[in-house]
Image (cartoon, coloured by chain):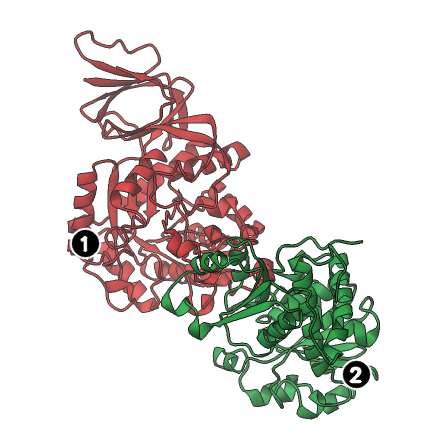
C-alpha cells in the first residue's frame, strides 16, 4: 500500500520554501515528492489518498520541552495521554523532561520511558535525562550510560544547576557524548518565594515577585560558561527582554548558545494574573508587554531558535487552590500551533521560519530524526488547516489535565492529520481522507 | 437612596466613592449603639456569621465577633489550629462544607493573597476579606478612613504618609487605594528594601526618609514591623530600624501641629513607634479600634441586605 497526500502546500523549513507538491509514502518513508499532476498511481497497488488541497503539509512538529509525568505522577499525565495530546496538536515527536518521580537520572528510568512509549506506539518520545543525580545540583549523572540508553539531552529542568562549577563540568562532559545541555535559568536565591513576575501587578496583588534578573543572571552565567569552555548550551523558555539581548550578543560573538521560548511568552503578559488565575502561573512567569515584544523580536531575528511548549500538566489538586500554593506550569501541546500561526498572521515571522522553530531547529539541536520532508526519510508530517477557526474548550483536550489559560480563546489554525513513520496517529473528522 | 450592590467585600478596589461614603455613613449610625447601656440591636437576628481565620488574630477577629453580636447575629469562629487546613483539606472543599451549613457571611483571614477571591467563587454566602496575605485588608482601610474623617472632618485634599514595610503590607495596599479614591494624597516612606521597586504604579510619592516624609502631612500612618522579616535581610536589626525609621517624639516635632498618628496594631513599642508617641496626644490608635467595630457592623448590615429597609433599631 502507498499513501498519496495530494494538493497540499509543502513547507520546507530548511530551504524556507512553500510549494504545491504531492507526497507519496511507502513503507513508512517518503518515497517521492511530485509536482502537481505528475504522479499517476499504479493500478495494481492499494492507494490511500489524502486530499490536502487548501492545506499546508509540514514536517512533523517537534516539541523539545514537555513534562509527561510518568513515572510517578500519572494522575496528571501519562506517556499515553501526553502522546495523544501531542498528536492532536500536530506533534510527531517530543522530548520529555526528567523531573519525574523517580527522576530520570539513570538508565532504568530512561529505558522505562522508552518502553512505555513503544507500547503506546503513537509519537516519538525522546527522554531528556537529568544533569545531576536527583536534580540536587550535587553530582553528575552517568551521561554516557544515559545516552546509550536513549537519552537525547540532559537538563535539570524545573530546577537550575545551582553550582556554576557543576554546570561547567556538565557542559564539558556532555560535549564528549554529543549530548545537548538544556538550562532552566533561575537564580533561586533571587526568585526566593516569588510566584509571579515582579512588577506593577505583583505589587498590586501582594504576591512575591520574581524579577526578570532572576532569569537573566543565569542566562549570562550559561553564556559565560559556554564562552569559557567552548561547549554548547541551550537556554530553555526565554521570557525576558534582557535574556533576548544577552543571547543576541552571545550569538554575535560566536558563542555556542541556542534558545527556545514557549507560546505563552509571546502571547500573554502579567496582566493575565490580575484575578489570581492559577492557570497563568508558570515558571518563568508571564512578564511585561515589553518582554513579550522582545521575545517576538527574538523569534523574528533568529535569536530564539525554537518554540517549545513546556507542556506541564497539573491536576485540580495543584491548581484549584490558593495562588501562592499552586503549582507552576500550563499545558501547551494542543495550543502551540495556532498561537504560533498567530505570529505568522501578525507578520512577526514567515511561515517556513515558524515551522522551522517547531520542527527543523529542535531536530538539529537534539540530533534526532525529522524536521524535513525528504525523499528516503521517515514520513513524519503534519497537515494543517491554516484557516480553521475554533474555540478552545476543556473537554476537547486530549491531555489528562486542562490547566490552560487559553480555554475559551478563539483560535485559528489546526492540525488535521498527524503522521508518524507513515502511520496516521491523529486525524480530524474534518479532513477528507479515503482509501 | 444609594444602594449597596455587593455580595462580597474582597478589596478596596471594588468599592466606588459612593460605596465608601455609604459605609462610613452607616458606621456613623451604628457607632452610637456601642455607647448605650444595652449594646445590642436585633437587626441581624437569625443571621449567621462565620469567622474563618487561617492566621492568628486577636483584634480583627474580636472586632468582627463584637460587631456581629451587637447586631444579634449568631457567630461561629474557626481558627487555624482547629481548622481543616492542617488536615490537608483544600480551601474549596472547606468552602463547600461551610456553605452546606448555609451561613450568611463568611469572614476570612488567610496567609495567601487572593484566598478570599477563591472562596467567594465557591460559596453563596457573602465573603468579607479580613486580610489576605500581602494583598488587601479592606475593613482596616475603611476604619482608617472613618477615623480620619471623624478627626479631620474630611478626607479629600489631606496629605497622608504611610511609614514602614509597604511591600509586605495589606494594610498599606488597601489604604493607598481607599485614600486615593477619596481624594487624599499619599506618600510612602521606609527602608528601600520595603518599598516596591515600581511604587509609582501605585500612584504614590516615595520619600524614603521619614523625617522628610512627614513634613506638612495631616496624617502619619505607621505600619507594624514584622520582626521575623529581619531574617530575610529586609533590615539588619530592630535597633537600627527604630533609630532610622521609627516614629519618636523628636521626629514628630517636624510634623504639623494638628497631625494625627495612626497604627493598625498590634504595636511594637519602641520599634516602629515610640511608646510615648503611641500613648501621646496625637495618637488616635484606640479610636481606630473602637471605630473598627462600627465599620464592621456597617459592613455586615450592608452585605446581608440592609439598606433595603431602614430599620436600625
Residue hosting label 1:
A109
* Above/below status of B129 relative to B265: above
Residue B202 placed where, x, y %?
67, 63
* Above/below status of A153 relative to B59: above
**Rendered residue at 75%/87% (across/down):** B252
Subunit under mark 2: B
The image quadrant that residue B13 belongs to is bottom right
Q: Chain B is drawn in which colour?
A: green
In depth, the one of A61 and A334 nearer the eye is A334
**Rendered residue at 83%/67% (across/down):** B157
In depth, the one of A64 and B172 nearer the eye is B172
**Whole-number angstrom distance, CA of label 2 to CA of label 1:** 69 Å
Q: Chain A is drawn in which colour?
A: red
Residue hosting label 2:
B255
Within 10 Å of disc 1 (Cα), the crowding (few <14, some 14-19, many 20+) is: many
Label 1: state its secondary structure.
helix
Residue B62 placed where, x, y %?
59, 77
In depth, the one of A423 and B154 nearer the eye is B154
Amino acid at each position: 500500500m502507498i499513501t498519496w497526500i495530494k494538493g497540499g502546500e509543502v513547507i520546507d523549513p530548511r530551504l524556507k520554501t512553500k510549494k504545491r507538491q504531492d507526497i507519496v509514502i511507502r513503507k513508512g518513508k517518503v518515497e517521492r515528492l511530485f509536482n502537481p499532476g505528475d504522479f499517476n498511481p499504479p493500478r495494481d497497488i492499494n492507494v490511500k489518498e489524502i486530499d490536502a488541497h487548501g492545506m499546508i503539509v509540514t514536517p512533523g512538529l517537534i516539541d523539545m520541552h514537555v513534562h509527561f509525568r510518568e513515572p510517578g505522577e500519572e494522575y496528571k499525565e501519562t506517556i499515553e495521554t501526553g502522546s495523544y495530546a501531542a498528536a492532536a496538536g500536530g506533534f510527531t515527536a517530543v522530548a520529555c523532561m526528567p523531573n519525574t518521580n523517580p527522576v530520570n537520572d539513570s538508565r532504568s528510568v530512561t529505558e522505562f520511558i522508552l518502553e512505555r512509549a513503544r507500547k503506546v506506539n503513537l509519537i516519538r518520545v525522546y527522554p531528556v535525562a537529568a544533569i545531576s543525580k536527583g536534580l540536587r545540583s550535587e553530582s553528575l549523572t552517568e551521561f554516557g550510560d544515559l545516552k546509550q540508553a536513549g537519552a537525547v539531552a540532559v537538563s535539570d529542568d524545573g530546577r537550575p544547576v545551582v553550582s556554576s562549577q557543576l554546570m561547567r563540568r556538565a557542559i564539558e562532559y556532555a560535549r564528549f557524548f554529543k549530548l545537548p545541555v538544556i538550562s532552566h535559568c533561575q537564580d533561586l536565591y533571587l526568585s526566593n518565594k516569588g510566584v509571579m513576575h515582579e512588577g506593577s501587578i505583583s505589587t498590586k496583588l501582594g504576591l512575591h515577585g520574581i524579577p526578570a534578573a532572576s532569569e537573566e543572571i543565569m542566562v549570562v552565567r550559561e553564556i559565560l560558561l559556554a564562552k569559557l569552555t567552548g561547549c554548547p548550551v541551550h537556554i530553555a523558555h526565554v521570557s525576558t527582554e534582557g535574556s533576548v539581548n544577552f543571547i543576541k550578543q552571545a550569538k554575535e560573538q560566536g558563542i555556542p548558545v541556542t534558545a527556545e521560548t514557549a507560546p505563552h511568552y509571546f502571547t500573554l503578559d502579567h496582566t493575565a494574573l490580575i484575578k489570581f488565575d492559577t492557570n497563568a502561573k508558570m515558571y518563568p512567569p508571564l512578564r511585561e508587554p515589553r518582554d513579550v515584544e522582545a521575545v517576538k523580536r527574538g523569534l523574528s531575528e533568529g535569536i530564539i531558535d525554537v518554540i517549545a511548549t513546556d507542556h506541564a500538566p497539573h491536576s485540580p489538586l495543584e491548581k484549584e487552590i490558593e495562588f501562592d500554593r499552586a503549582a507552576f506550569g500550563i499545558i501547551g501541546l494542543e495550543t502551540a500551533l495556532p498561537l504560533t500561526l498567530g505570529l505568522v498572521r501578525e507578520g512577526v515571522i514567515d511561515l517556513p521560519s515558524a515551522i522551522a522553530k517547531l520542527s527543523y531547529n529542535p531536530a538539529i539541536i537534539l540530533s534526532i530524526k525529522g524536521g524535513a520532508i525528504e525523499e528516503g526519510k521517515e514520513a513524519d508530517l503534519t497537515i494543517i488547516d491554516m484557516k480553521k477557526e475554533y474555540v478552545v474548550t476543556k473537554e476537547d483536550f486530549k491531555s489528562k489535565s486542562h490547566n490552560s489559560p487559553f480555554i475559551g480563546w478563539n483560535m485559528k489554525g489546526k492540525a488535521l492529520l498527524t503522521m508518524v513513520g507513515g502511520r496516521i496517529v491523529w486525524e480530524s473528522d474534518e479532513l477528507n481522507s479515503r482509501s | 437612596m444609594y444602594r449597596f450592590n455587593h455580595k462580597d467585600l474582597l478589596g478596596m478596589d471594588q468599592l466606588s466613592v459612593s460605596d465608601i461614603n455609604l459605609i462610613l455613613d452607616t458606621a456613623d449610625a451604628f457607632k452610637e449603639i456601642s455607647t448605650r447601656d444595652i449594646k445590642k440591636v436585633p437587626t441581624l437576628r437569625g443571621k449567621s456569621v462565620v469567622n474563618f481565620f487561617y492566621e492568628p488574630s486577636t483584634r480583627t477577629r474580636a472586632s468582627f465577633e463584637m460587631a456581629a453580636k451587637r447586631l444579634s447575629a449568631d457567630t461561629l469562629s474557626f481558627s487555624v489550629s482547629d481548622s481543616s487546613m492542617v488536615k490537608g483539606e483544600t480551601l474549596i472543599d472547606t468552602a463547600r462544607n461551610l456553605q452546606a451549613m448555609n451561613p450568611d457571611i463568611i469572614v476570612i483571614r488567610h496567609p495567601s493573597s487572593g484566598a478570599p477571591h477563591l472562596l467567594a467563587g465557591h460559596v453563596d454566602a457573602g465573603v468579607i476579606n479580613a486580610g489576605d496575605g500581602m494583598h488587601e485588608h479592606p475593613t482596616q482601610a475603611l476604619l482608617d478612613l472613618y477615623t480620619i474623617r471623624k478627626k479631620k472632618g474630611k478626607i479629600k485634599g489631606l496629605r497622608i504618609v504611610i511609614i514602614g514595610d509597604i511591600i509586605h503590607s495589606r494594610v498599606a495596599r488597601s489604604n493607598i487605594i481607599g485614600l486615593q479614591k477619596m481624594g487624599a494624597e499619599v506618600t510612602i516612606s521606609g527602608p528601600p528594601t520595603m518599598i516596591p521597586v515600581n511604587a509609582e504604579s501605585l500612584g504614590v510619592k516615595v520619600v524614603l526618609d521619614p523625617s522628610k516624609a512627614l513634613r506638612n502631612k495631616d496624617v502619619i500612618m505607621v505600619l507594624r514591623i514584622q520582626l521575623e522579616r529581619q531574617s530575610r535581610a529586609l533590615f539588619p536589626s530592630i535597633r537600627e530600624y527604630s533609630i532610622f525609621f521609627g516614629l519618636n517624639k523628636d521626629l514628630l516635632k517636624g510634623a504639623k501641629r494638628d497631625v494625627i498618628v495612626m497604627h493598625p496594631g498590634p504595636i511594637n513599642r519602641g520599634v516602629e513607634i515610640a511608646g510615648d508617641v503611641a500613648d501621646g496626644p496625637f495618637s488616635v490608635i484606640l479610636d481606630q479600634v473602637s471605630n473598627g467595630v462600627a465599620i464592621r457592623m456597617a459592613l455586615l448590615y450592608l452585605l446581608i441586605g440592609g439598606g433595603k429597609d431602614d430599620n436600625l433599631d
